[in-house]
Amino acid sequence: MSITPVHYIAVPLLAAFLIPLLAKLHKELVRIVPGLVFLYFLIISVTLMQQLPETGTISEVIAGWSAPWGINLVFSPFSGFLASLMSFIGFLAWLYSYRFKKVDFAQSQKYFILLMMLVTGSIGIVLTGDIFNLFVFLEIVAISSYSLTSFYSGRDSAEAAFKQLLIGSFASAFILLGILILYTQTGTLNMADLATKVHLIAPSVKISILVLFLVGFGIEAEMFPLNGWAPDVYSQAPGPIGSVFAGVVVKAGIYALIRVLYTIFDIPEITHLLIILGVITMIIAEVAALRQDNLKRMLAYSSIGQMGVVLIAFGIGTNTAIFAALFLMFNHAIIKSMLFFSSSYLLYNSTTKAITHLTGFAKKMPFVAFIFALGAFAIVGLPPFSGFWSKLYLLMAAADQKMLLLIGTILVISVVEIIYYFRVIGKLYYGKEENNIEIQKPSINGYIVMGILGAIIIVVGVYPDLITGIIHNAADALSDKSTYIQSVITENIVR
Amino acid sequence: MSFDYQNIVTISVYGSAIALILIGIYAVLIKKNLIKIVIGMSIVDAGIHLLFVAIGYINNGTAPIFSPGNEDRVLDMVDPVPQALVLTAIVIGFATTAVALALVIRLYKHHGSASIDNIKSLKW
């Protein structure tokens, strides 16, 4: 049986059905089986990515009806890169949460199944070639995230989940309306087929479809002013889930937005709109992060600001800019996940999650504090860590287009980032130590996960060529619409 | 525009679907009781589903099934794709409403009131 992209979807759904049955055999299977699924994801990611240079974009047809009438999964260099990144972050999240908190059996069953569904839904969003299938996977991600946000039984987490649910249901309603109007105008739901037929729609209808999709997918991609749900959700969800949200789910949201805007619509003026929205998102999120005293909310606002920078990079639109955007997404996934992982252990016994709780922690938990400092240095873009290269490429792309005001804004916002991150590092390393706070030493899994991510940051920072080859192929695959359309509709069909 | 029977039916179906969507959005934005907000979300879903099914309809159309005696009425068949999409969307809407109601129960237990004005511990 050869390995095809449908294994990304079929295997975890089968495992999710079987886990409650297997749990009656032996209770530890609830924690082990999702780990095996994530390990399988890693294996098929590596296998399919290695097959890509020989076969080109793999487009797989599900259930026998070939595109454009049936659903197909497309594994291009761009979507394959994102799917591999998401499976890697998912595997690390499973490894980290294997013994994270002492939750009892019934709750841990829910947690691991939902974690698996969250990552599967995001990979499904990235791999699918049909716009209604995109909506279905978006709903899988949404319902899993509502349940995971309200996992701990406090009052704040229920409020955060309800806010997310209200705004998320509006997102689904608008996306569904957009799909409806698109279907009545063109008669097809396949994204490659839509790309060939969109120029037949009248401009007024095209603008209304575009606005509906912009609002709907912008809610998932945390654009301003649609990101009010994000700080509450990131701060109330369990620690590993916060890093899965920041590293996997928001990438899927941005992917859906970019796929719809770039591949289906091809309007030149959309780039200016994306740059403006990205700048507003970045400025408001980073300035709001300055006045937070809750560490996880600060990280959440920083994450929203980084996504604003990614939107700016996608908005500039040249090949260098798309390369910079993908490199920024890769770096943000790795570094922000590491920051969330380490801050979960720093705040383990704190009820208020305040930064002032962290005075002098560097002496009690030296490794975790070092990992947090490493992540902070990397995300503001200091060399020799990997965040430096992505910001450099972004500024180079902006300089090619002579957008000097944009370069100035990004650099000023980088200074703002430095202020609030170094404030935390200062508290960690130079604060006065208090003796009556008990800490929680990380389990061996936590050490391994944080160590792996830290090593990746340092290695990619010193040798960026390890990753830039893959990201260059991904950027080329995104900006080249005709290859995508050809590989879906005519050639390279795997049955 | 001639006011025959088909036109009136089409206009009233589309109009009521859009009216349902607008009523649902009004309920989510203005109402203060948590249960009414969840009902508003459900009404928005119902409006969108009705709009989807109405899009696929052809006047004097027949069901899109090749039964004996109906094989040559292909041009008259109602579009089956929106109907399949609506089935999926109904299930998704039902699951979301179930999760929403579970959260409403938890919020009521913690705060003691079902009014959204009292639930504001998480701000900027």
Image: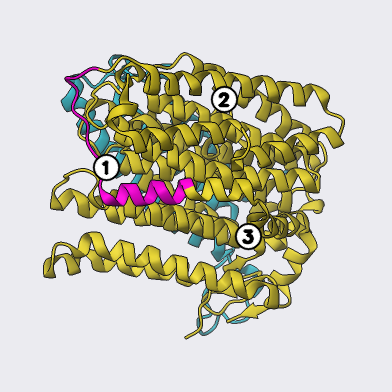
Chain colours: A yellow, B cyan
Rendered-image quadrant of the C terminus of chain A: bottom right
Q: Which mark is residue A189?
A: 3
The amino acid at mark 1 is Pro
Q: Residue A225's mark?
A: 2
Q: Nearer the viewer, residue A388 or A111?
A: A388
Q: Is residue A155 left or right of residue B19?
A: left
Extent of the magenta region: A434-454
In which chain is the residue bearing label 3?
Answer: A
A331 or A195: nearer the eye? A331
Q: Within 10 angstroms of label 3, few (less than 14), some, or many (20 or more) residues?
A: many
Q: Is residue B84 magenta?
A: no
- Percent from the top left, x then y, of residue A446? 32, 47
In this rendering, the label closer to the viewer, 3 or 1: 1
Label 3 and label 1: CA atoms lie apart by: 48 Å
Q: Which mark is first along the chain, 3 or 2?
A: 3
Question: Residue at (80%, 41%) from the top-left corner?
Answer: A203
Residue A442 is tagged as 1
Distance of label 2 from label 3 (alpha carbons) = 29 Å
Name the amino acid, label 2. Pro
Classify residue A73 as left or right of residue B20. Answer: right
